[in-house]
Image (spheres, grey):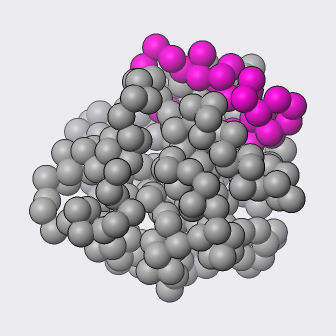
Amino acid sequence: MNCLSPSLLASDFSILGEQVKMLDEAGAQYVHIDVMDGSFVPSISFGLPVIKSIRKCTDRIFDVHLMIDEPVRYIDEFVDAGADLITVHAEACKHLDRTLHAIKDRGVLAGVALNPATPLSVLDYILPECDMVLLMSVNPGFGGQKYIPYTTQKIRDLKKMMEEKHCQADIEVDGGVSLNNVQEVLDAGANIIVAGTAVFKGDIRENVESFLNIMEKIICSFARPLRLFVIEKFLMMREAKRYEYVDCDRWKY
């Protein structure tokens, strides 16, 4: 299933809650939240109070991208704030395996992000533990950058790697994706698209619908609550009963 994950980094912070609701109404399945610490990347962005405050604005999947050093220190806090999916950078974790299991132990999905120049070989042993791999198609830290062309081949290579390892993880691409190149990204093998400026510049609803029209061949109906898709997918992929979603109020619908 192809999904759109609009990046709030490009939103109007003065009306953030309103714009989150617009994304929901327009049909975007995810909400991409970039958390930056000013150390791993140059910028500083959203913190825990912001995530917690907008959680009540939508029931869409909170796709929290931690661009911070040693994110394992804050997993509990981000889950408590409302994260449904937490992605950490391989480059920022001393112990990546430990960090992914810390995320899963809290009953949410775990992703690994790679910067543009980071080789896919980093994933050789950890890929089976990933629910999603995020490929950065710009150097992280700032919005509005141009898509790095070699990312397309990197997506193809990752897709092939996953097929060889019989891995069903999602492939998310973040950075410089627009209506002009999203088809190229999808054709290469990505199925979750992060778009910031391309969504928030101009008419948000119209932009979201334009993305979804391109992706609609594989997009499923929004009739069922989207968190149910996450639950079903997680249980199917993990086949483990140690993640008891039913005990967590956030998963009720």
Residue at (52%, 38%) from the top-left corner?
29
Quarter of the figure with residue 30: top right
Q: Which sits in the foreground, 58 or 183?
A: 58
- Horizontally, residue 23 falls left or right of residue 121, namely right
The magenta segment: 190-218
- Horizontally, residue 156 falls left or right of residue 28, namely left
Q: Looking at this view, name the residue that lies furthest to the bottom.
A: 73
Q: Which sits in the foreground, 240 or 129?
A: 240
Quarter of the figure with residue 214: top right
- Horizontally, residue 85 falls left or right of residue 138, namely left
Q: Position of residue 65 (x, y in %)?
A: 58, 60
Q: Position of residue 75 (x, y in %)?
A: 46, 77
Residue 24 appearing in the image: yes
Residue at (39%, 63%) from the top-left corner?
250
Residue 1 appearing in the image: no
Q: Is residue 191 magenta?
A: yes
Q: Is residue 69 magenta?
A: no
In this rendering, the answer to whether 211 lies above or below 140 is above
Task: State which quarter of the image contains the N terminus.
Answer: top left
In this rendering, the answer to whether 214 lies above or below 52 is above
Q: How many marks?
A: 0
- Horizontally, residue 74 falls left or right of residue 248, namely right
In this rendering, the answer to whether 163 lies above or below 132 is above
Q: Position of residue 76 (x, y in %)?
A: 44, 80
Residue at (63%, 31%) from the top-left corner?
26
Residue at (65%, 22%) from the top-left corner?
209
